[in-house]
DNA sequence: CTGTATATTCTGTTATATCTGAAATGTCGG
DNA sequence: CCGACATTTCAGATATAACAGAATATACAG
């Protein structure tokens, strides 16, 4: 299959961005290709289109399936697996966010708890350190609960919400404006507000 | 400087997580060390503590400074640079989010615009592809504006907001519950809601 | 059972990222 | 300007990740 200039550009860029997010370039490119493709593609064709080894495609597809953003389908009279990407970006985002949380944030929270515990046991520990650990822990837990909020919204609401520019301050209880975003370089205590 | 068990655990884990986010392991470790440290550390000591080459520390610190989450300070009577981490996790998060947006999302939005343009010019292009590109573009733009909203909130509000579990649906206009999070596998059109 | 088409796993190679140690550069007191 | 200390740069070494191609496994038709 020959790629149009627009397809090429998108696929290459997506691959590039993938690497910055800890995703293998080929994996990201395959995903981009499938996302743009109007119908399911067999592995063979993916390999030919992107110019990578068939085996490489196989591994990459398995990873994408692992993330849950690509799945296999079948065509009548064709023994080969055909692959499709999730069609909806919002849904895709939800899945990726959930996976990353599970793989990266949750373990970190667990480790932080252990560290706090350790710091408590160990000879009264460094007070400063314990505070920092707790601050990080509180932050991550807040983000998790914020994540749960957003996750529970249907796509439509989320989309509408995002369009609601500049209204958040009025909606969120007690949110005074931050406005100028001026961060005085001298502030050393993050708890200054509140 | 000798590390306590809790420090070790946190620093090692942070380094590990760093790699998953496209951040160099040493860079992340140094950041973790500085975050926990009660006072500024000279590069020499960082190198000794983590057991890496002095030159490596130098490069890593420059990167952290580039991100704006570590800065250099000086002690009276000491010619060496001493380094400190931003103390506030929330502030840190803001800065990192902003940087990543600038480096990764903004360029992607630009590329998507070009792709859409290309697809329009090129022989009426693939209709399906153009739709997908537009959906992705709309998504990213929504996320950007959502990001602007959150960024403009002071830490206190953000934190309070995050604690406000399960209330979001009532606050957001028109957000009907999504609840069960049941995703029928048969839905192929992401726009089904709304 | 055999042959063919497809998919996966394995192994060695290649590419990329990271790290080190040495050399170069910068800084500052005297 | 000199000399010590501190930092940065750079070339080569090392580790890690990605990849191609061969080998293997699986499914299936006849």
Image: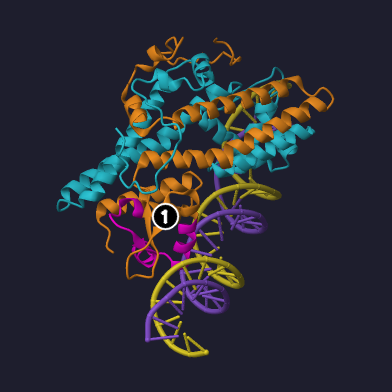
Chain colours: A orange, B cyan, C yellow, D purple
Q: Is residue A109 visible?
A: yes
Q: Position of residue D2 (x, y in %)?
A: 70, 34
Q: Is residue A176 left or right of residue B90?
A: left
The structure residue drawn at horizontal position 48% and vertical position 15%, both measured from the top left corner, is B154
Secondary structure of the residue carrying numbered label 1: strand
Which residue lies at the image location 72% right of the left edge and 33% below the top edge?
Answer: A114
Q: Nearer the viewer, residue A129 or C15?
A: A129
Q: Quadrant of residue B71?
A: top right
Q: Chain of mark 1?
A: A
Quarter the N terminus of chain A occupies: bottom left
| Res. B191 image quadrant | top left
Which residue bears the numbered disc 1? A71
> Residue B78: where, in percent of width, then height?
71, 22
The residues colored magenta run A33-62
Please give left or right for residue A1 compared with residue B152 in the image.
Answer: left
Q: Nearer the viewer, residue B179 or C3?
A: B179
Viewer-side residue, A184 vs A15? A15
| Residue A125 position in % (x across, y down) | 79, 24
Q: Is residue A45 magenta?
A: yes
């Amino acid at each position: 299959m020959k790629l149009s200039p627009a397809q090429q550009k998108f696929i290459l860029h997506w691959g590039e961005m993938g690497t910055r997010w800890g995703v293998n370039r080929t994996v990201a490119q395959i995903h981009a290709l499938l996302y743009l493709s109007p119908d399911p593609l067999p592995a063979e064709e993916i390999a030919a289109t992107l110019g990578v080894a068939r085996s490489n495609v196989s591994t990459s597809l398995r990873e994408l399936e692992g993330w849950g953003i690509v799945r296999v389908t079948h065509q009548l009279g064709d023994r080969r697996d055909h692959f499709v990407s999730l069609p909806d970006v919002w849904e895709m985002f939800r899945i990726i966010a959930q996976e990353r949380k599970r793989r990266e944030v949750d373990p970190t929270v667990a480790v932080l708890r252990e560290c706090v515990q350790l710091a408590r046991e160990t000879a009264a520990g460094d007070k400063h350190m314990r505070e920092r650990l707790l601050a990080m822990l509180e932050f991550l837990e807040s983000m998790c609960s914020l994540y749960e909020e957003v996750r529970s919204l249907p796509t439509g609401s989320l989309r509408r919400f995002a369009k609601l520019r500049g209204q958040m301050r009025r909606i969120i209880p007690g949110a005074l404006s931050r406005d100028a975003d001026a961060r005085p370089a001298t502030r050393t205590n993050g708890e200054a507000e509140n």
